[in-house]
Image: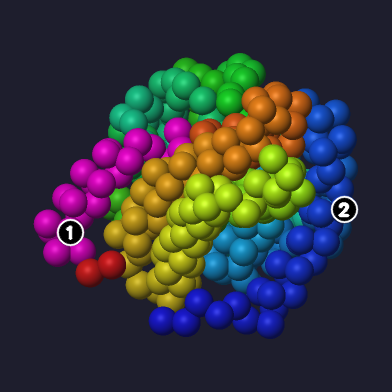
């Protein structure tokens, strides 16, 4: 396997880093509150980055999400990329791709997903009933990808459902999704749970990539702070305890990154990536919260300031931990998969 980005993927990452770095300043993020930064999303779409996701593949999306995570940019790139563009492109019918992808590519439409399946949604004759407690970026979405109790994938127009605003730990424009005989269309024509498993694995991989960026950003802030903050006439970064804490955070961040890359590479290569995605999700959940706690701790008293930029990384890291699932649950699911002889 080769995780080296292609020239196109690297160029897209550099472009994303430049746009995100210019517009996701601390002042703009503070002004955005808990909502999406519409101007930033428009800039990303004008640069053609969401549209490029189909060609860049899941690994390309992971690279873009790393850059988003570094600056905790408040845009629905992860949700639209994995639950919209890649899901429709890989699993939709020809008619669905022709109808839905153009608006998703240019950013005039946003998609999200009510994942993972919890069995709370029932389908009967093309209508869905049930409630999903919170869905990321639901308040921005035009379409929601919803798995029913049988893990069949359905597309629901957000305007046909009841959406109630929900505030999360991180500013993800989330909402509570209430379905009451809501009309829906099935995504694609494949029978069985294959499409659900593939989209779930892609989502776990994408959000793990986002966590890798969040952790890298948190660690970068901690390194910069401890390099200039002095105690007893010496920079904090010269203290062995600080160095060891930062080194552990670096190794955790790299573990999240490399496992996310592996899962994305397997997916793009057409290989089963369920096990690799679970591994990436576990690292992102367990190691991710360690890293953002370290980033805050290494800032000392400043890390307790809710208005400090590093606190935003802490909030995102904990939200991603919650979204990806508890580490023990992910390990149990991975164990079951390995017991069945899954090769990934």
Q: Residue at x 51, y 19 (%)?
A: 178
Our reading of the magenta stretch's main secondary structure is helix
Q: Which comes before the other along the chain, label 1 or label 2?
A: 2
| Closer to viewer: mark 1 or mark 2 | 2
Any part of residue 231 in sight: yes
Say if the magenta span includes residue 96: no
Horizontally, residue 96 falls left or right of residue 108, namely: left
Residue 148 falls left or right of residue 188: left
Horizontal side of 244 relative to 48 (left or right) equals left
Residue 87 sits above or below residue 76 on the image: below
Instruction: Give me the residue at 41% from left, 81% from top.
Output: 1
List the residue tagged with mark 1.
338
Span of residues in magenta: 321-342
Q: Secondary structure at mark 2?
A: helix
Q: What's the CA distance linking mark 1 and mark 2? A: 44 Å
Camera-nearest residue between 158 and 315: 315
Q: Magenta span has 328?
A: yes
Question: Which residue is labeled 2 in the image?
Answer: 22
């Amino acid at each position: 396997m080769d995780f080296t980005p292609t020239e196109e993927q690297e160029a897209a990452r550099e472009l994303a880093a430049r746009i995100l770095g210019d517009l996701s300043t601390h002042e703009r993020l503070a002004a955005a509150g808990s909502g999406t930064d519409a101007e930033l999303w428009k800039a990303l779409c004008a640069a053609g980055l969401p549209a490029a996701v189909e060609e860049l593949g899941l690994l390309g999306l992971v690279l873009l999400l790393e850059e988003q995570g570094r600056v905790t940019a408040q845009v629905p790139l992860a949700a639209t990329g994995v639950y919209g563009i890649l899901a429709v492109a890989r699993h939709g019918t020809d008619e669905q791709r022709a109808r839905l992808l153009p608006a998703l590519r240019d950013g005039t439409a946003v998609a999200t997903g009510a994942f993972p399946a919890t069995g709370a949604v029932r389908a009967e004759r093309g209508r869905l009933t049930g409630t999903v407690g919170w869905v990321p970026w639901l308040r921005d979405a035009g379409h929601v990808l919803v798995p029913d109790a049988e893990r069949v994938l359905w597309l629901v127009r957000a305007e046909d459902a009841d959406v109630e605003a929900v505030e999360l730990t991180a500013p993800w424009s989330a909402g509570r999704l209430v379905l009451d005989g809501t009309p829906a269309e099935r995504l694609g024509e494949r029978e069985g749970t294959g499409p659900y498993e593939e989209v779930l694995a892609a989502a776990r991989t994408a959000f793990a990539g986002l966590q890798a960026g969040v952790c890298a950003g948190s660690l970068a802030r901690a390194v910069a702070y401890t390099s200039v903050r002095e105690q007893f006439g010496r920079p904090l970064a010269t203290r062995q305890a600080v160095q060891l804490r930062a080194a552990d955070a670096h190794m955790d961040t790299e573990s999240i990154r490399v496992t996310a890359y592996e899962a994305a590479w397997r997916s793009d290569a057409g290989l089963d990536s369920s096990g690799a995605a679970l591994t990436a999700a576990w690292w992102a959940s367990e190691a991710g919260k360690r890293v953002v706690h370290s980033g805050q701790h290494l800032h000392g008293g400043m890390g307790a300031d809710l208005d400090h930029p590093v606190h935003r990384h802490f909030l995102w890291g904990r939200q991603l931990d919650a979204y990806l699932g508890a580490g023990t649950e992910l390990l149990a699911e991975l164990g079951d998969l390995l017991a069945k002889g899954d090769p990934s």
